[in-house]
Image (spheres, rainbow, N blue to C red):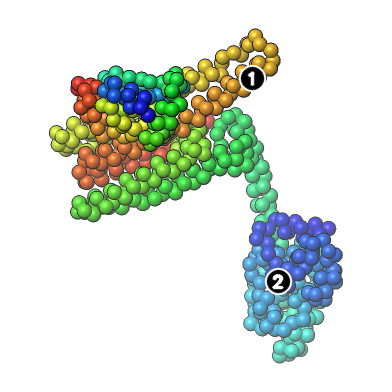
Amino acid sequence: MDRVRDLASKKAAVIFTKSSCCMCYSIKTLFYELGASPAIHELDHDPSGRDMEWALRGLGCDPSVPAVFIGGRFVGSAKDVISLHVDGSLKQMLMDAKAIWF
Amino acid sequence: MRRKQQKECGALIPNFKLPTHYAVFNSAKASGQAVSPDCNHIGTLDKTPTSFAINRSATQVESRLPLEKVQQTNLVSISSGYTENWGESNMADASPKTDISTDADTDEKSQRSDRGKLNAVVASDSSDRSKGSLDQKTLRRLAQNREAARKSRLRKKAYVQQLESSRLKLTQLEQELQRARQQGIFISSAGDQSHAMGGNGAMAFDVEYARWLEEQNRLINELRTGVNSHAGDAELRIIVDSVLVHYDEIFRLKSNAAKADVFHLLSGMWKTPAERCFLWLGGFRSSELLKLLVSQLEPLTEQQLVGISNLQQSSQQAEDALSQGMEALQQSLSETLSTGSLGSSGSSGNVANYMGQMAMAMGKLGTLEGFIRQADNLRQQTLQQMHRILTTRQSARALLAIHDYFSRLRALSSLWLARPRE
């Protein structure tokens, strides 16, 4: 959990993924489309990946990846991100966290 | 021969049901016992248990058995299977209640006629007729019987022919279905899928979807009435909300169906052909829908225009993201299945590779469900955001426009399927 929090606070937009996860690929694409450059951490290539996955599940993230943090705060999984994107909240959050400028 | 007739009769005529005292006969037959002892229960019948059954069944087909009337006149020979109507008031009744037998039984029939005639004599005596007119009446009755019996036989023949041709058609259809299935056209069927759940899931969803469409039509009509009659905002809001809730319902149904059979949803076979043309990840494209609506929703305030424009852009972006994810999935799946086909290791190594590949591929296929779910999530969110941006009346018109659009697509599909072909 500490590692998750630690990594999540390092950049305005942080996404935890797995290299094999295609939904993660979709969410990454969405962020790029919005002009954000999120930090990507692949759990399957991290030594403490399993612990981190467990921690993410503990936060209520199901499936555990993709797990999105904006401004250090846990936003949610793919479903939450899409919902927030549709009603315009995602963009606002990114702007507030200075991940994007317009 | 009689046994065969009886069996044929039972097989040919659906809902073949004998009344209870005949049922004694029937159950005995079913349990393999000899028929005749049971016939004694029923009466004096000695030689025609089966044609007796035929008689009964034939009259069942005709659905007219005046057993009560016969019983009323207290006649002895019910058991002869001779269901001629002897009631006083029914002499001229032309309905086919008489002795009905197959062609081969004509001799027996006339014998029974004679027997019946005798019984008629007995009955008539007790029912107050003069002896002189008896012969004439009897003769007339017999003639009527014969005529009715003939008509019955003809009807039965026609019915049997109809059944035979239906059976033939059924066989042909089954063959066609088999052929089509072999060609890879998806046809959902209960017993034929390798994974029973898959087949059932598809069919079950199709049924649920049909029901949902019906309810949708009803709600939309209600909405249309409300809009056309210039109903108040409060009233309109209730109907609009119920339509939106109903949309939630289809997304819920699709979510369940995705668990059971994601490929059925992805194939779009649950939609009509023209709708399938525009299929994207198992449903409609929200961004396209919004494009259609903008022109129909005018006039919009500045704020609303911005809102709708943003919504269009957002849904487009989300659609692109999901599409790219799907492409990545396809690519990944291809790679998984194509690597190491010419392995240099021993055969056991190859088998292990193969199984490993399959396991990985299986995992990837499993993620398809997630994509459909997010695509539906996008559709649902778009509808709700649209509703937030628009006024109640505008929402009502938007929902009507959406429904009309899909209705026209469905109508187009029907026309297309019914088009004359060379």
**Left or right of B130 on screen, residue B361:** left
Q: Nearer the viewer, residue A40 or B84?
A: A40
Could you tell me the amino acid type at mark 2? Thr
Q: Earlier in the sequence, mark 2 or mark 1?
A: 2
Residue at 66 percent of width and 16 percent of height? B349
Residue B2: name its quadrant. Answer: bottom right
Disc 1, SS: helix
Q: Are marks 2 and 1 on the same chain?
A: yes
Residue marked by disc 2: B20
Q: Which residue is outermost to the left?
A: B302
Residue at 63 percent of width and 67 percent of height? B63
Residue marked by disc 1: B352
How far separated are the C-alphas under marks 2 and 1? 66 Å
**Left or right of B75 on screen, residue B295:** left
Could you tell me the amino acid type at mark 1? Ala
Q: Is residue B9 above or below residue B190?
A: below
Q: In this view, does B226 lie above or below B34?
A: above
Label 1 is found on which chain of the structure?
B
Residue A91: name its quadrant. Answer: top left
Q: Can residue A47 be seen in this view?
A: yes
- Give x and y (percent) for residue B315: 30, 30
Disc 2, SS: helix
